[in-house]
Image: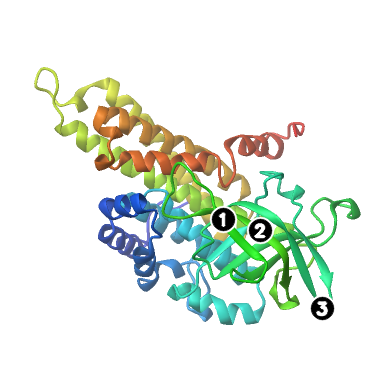
Amino acid sequence: MDFLLNEQQKMIIETARKVGGEYGLEYWREIDAKKQFPTEIWKAICSSGLAAAALPEEHGGSGLGMLELAMIVETLAASGAGSTVGQLFMNNPIFGGVGISRFGTAQMKRDYLPKLVSGEMLFCMALTEPDAGSNSLEIQTFARREGNGFRINGRKIWITGVPQADKVLVIARTQKAEDVKRRTDGITMFLLDRDREGLSHTPIEKVGTNTLTSSMVFLDDVWAGPDEIVGTLDMGWHELLDVLNTERIVTTACLVGTAQLAIELAVKYAGERKVFRGAPIGSYQGLQFPLAEAYAQTETARLMNYKAASLFDSGLPYGSEANIAKLIAGHASAQATDRAMQTMGGMGYAKESYVERLWRDARLFRIAPISEEMILNFISIHNLKMPRSY
């Protein structure tokens, strides 16, 4: 077991640090206030090759792995972006990249992956539904057969990045739940044009992650051709899980970077701020200990995430590790951002301190893309072999 970075990984981290530094805290504060998509930094990420890290070389990628992608995301987050930058990677190298490179047709790979790598195309995924929530097997969106294709009808909620996306990975049932032997049967992934007739969307007002819109998506008799199926018709559930579990790795990476950044901002402030007896407030154990605990949680989450990514890159099961890492990272980012605000006192609540944005954005990821409670359910059932509770 080797915990040392190789030269290529060091170079990738340095590249990510340089790109992230060019679009630092002030850039993200400004576009957050405007609710503006981070076009400039995504172009820079793609131009530097960072978006291509885990994608195949034959289609313009770097042919590296999920481990390197995790390092890139956490470095960008720690350089000023915070957790929102992870959503850019979830939508594109994960939903678009992993989905297409692992399960897409040869034509999809040729047509879309090079444009994903260059930043010419953007992607998103429409899975979650108002009545199904975390229970993805209960989705009601249905693709009925018509001629050689399908007509899709349904509603999706909390879909990130729809207005900018060129393609939407839509998850639908192609067999009714009551007609299949196993609940996991009858689910199919489709890759559709975002501006396809019958597909509409409306934004949801929310607390944070303002630079990427979250939307309700409506599918009204949307046409899907047979060449737009990603993976196996009717048997896409386990293929979808590969996409979702790699999403966990990226989520953890952005939370680790967020926690690291929040701690650094708090330590810097505490080293400069003097209130009583002329000593910096950073000398008070009441401020030190919570930040030290957040640091310990952050390092633990990082290591577990690297393990999950390494297992994925080796073709081994990694779901438990990815979920555990995400759970710990959610706690770490919550502790780090909250205690950083507390360390700064009133200034922690001011936008000019930057921490309030980190706090708002990171809060989402204790709920999404999978809630802490669902992770604990998973660990109880799959790791501890306890009775199913739901």
Image coordinates for residue 186, horizontal then vertical, percent: 81, 59
Front of the two marks 3 and 2? 2
Of mark 2 and mark 1, the one earlier in the sequence is 1
- Mark 2 to mark 1: distance in Å? 9 Å
Pick out the residue farthest to the left. Answer: 278
Kind of residue at badge 3: Asn
Kind of residue at badge 2: Phe
Q: 6 or 117, which is in the foreground?
A: 117
At horizontal 46% and vertical 75% (from top left) the residue drawn is: 120
Q: Is residue 62 visible?
A: no
At horizontal 34% and vertical 66% (from top left) the residue drawn is: 40
At horizontal 28% and vertical 41% (from top left) the residue drawn is: 351
Image coordinates for residue 4, horizontal then vertical, percent: 38, 54
Of mark 3 and mark 1, the one earlier in the sequence is 3
Quadrant of res 274: top left
Label 2: state its secondary structure: strand
Front of the two marks 3 and 1? 1
Q: Which mark is residue 218?
A: 2
Kind of residue at badge 1: Thr
Q: Which mark is residue 148?
A: 3
